[in-house]
Amino acid sequence: MSLFRRTLAAAGAPNCFTRLLVLAACVLAVTASASAAERSRIQVNDYVIDADLAPKTHHITAKAKVKFTALDDISTAVFELNNGLRVTRVTNEAGKTMPTERVTQDFTIRVSLPEGLSKGQSHTLTFDYEGVLDKADDSPVEGLKLASIGPDTTYLLYAARWFPMVGYNTNRFTATIQVTVPAFFAVAGSTSKPVSSRSLGARQSQYRHARPHPAIRQLPSFGIRQAFPAQSLREPSSRPTQAI
């Protein structure tokens, strides 16, 4: 795992992210058997995710472009998504809005495919969604807060289903994930390539995470923490970002 950070040592972030990794490993052990109970009829091949986090209001606004392949002949594509998140729109490759159904009992979003997909056929859907993540009430694993967005520390674990997904802990996929946070926050996440970051001005910074090869060992989880007080806010580009 690589961590991308900005003055994280001073903020004590390594210990925070170590604890998150331990929690993620425990969640994998607890939920692996349950997730394997029902075989998904699709396999995700690639994600392009753009997430904007507002720690003060515990809010996330995101867009996920999902390329997937049908494993059977299907007329509906089913994805898992945290119940704390609301899908505002799903569009197909032509930009047409697709009919969707939210089923809270199993944390799924069901997208109708009027023309259907044959086994082996691939398609791309784009999900626009938003919501508040700060409680365990909507967690896919009862009693565990797997995602939390807060003014001091934020974490988004893979098991939280914070993006539309299938085949928990079994589906291998590539991904490009871009996270925008306030400029006085630093982000850490798993990646096989150096992480890039850029300033969006004095108030925001953007981090880009890439997984160019299909894998499940590098789970798309993130930890986000204040790197220095907001009162001492400086231009983010003046503080180097590094991968370790």
Image (spheres, helix red, strand yellow):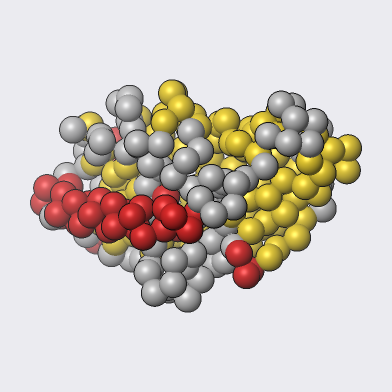
* Residue drawn at (62%, 70%) of the image: 105
Q: Is residue 201 visible?
A: no
* Residue drawn at (72%, 46%) of the image: 77
* Residue drawn at (17%, 44%) of the image: 7
Q: Nearer the viewer, residue 77 or 241?
A: 77
Q: Position of residue 190 (x, y in %)?
A: 32, 38
Is 239 located above or below residue 204 in the figure?
above
Using residue 35 as the reference point, say whether residue 193 is left or right of it: left
Q: Quadrant of residue 126?
A: top right
Using residue 91 as the reference point, say whether residue 225 is left or right of it: left
Q: Nearer the viewer, residue 133 or 109?
A: 109
Using residue 21 as the reference point, say whether residue 87 is left or right of it: right
Q: Nearer the viewer, residue 70 or 51?
A: 70
Q: Position of residue 203 (x, y in %)?
A: 39, 50
Farthest residue, direction right: 115
Q: Is residue 187 visible?
A: yes
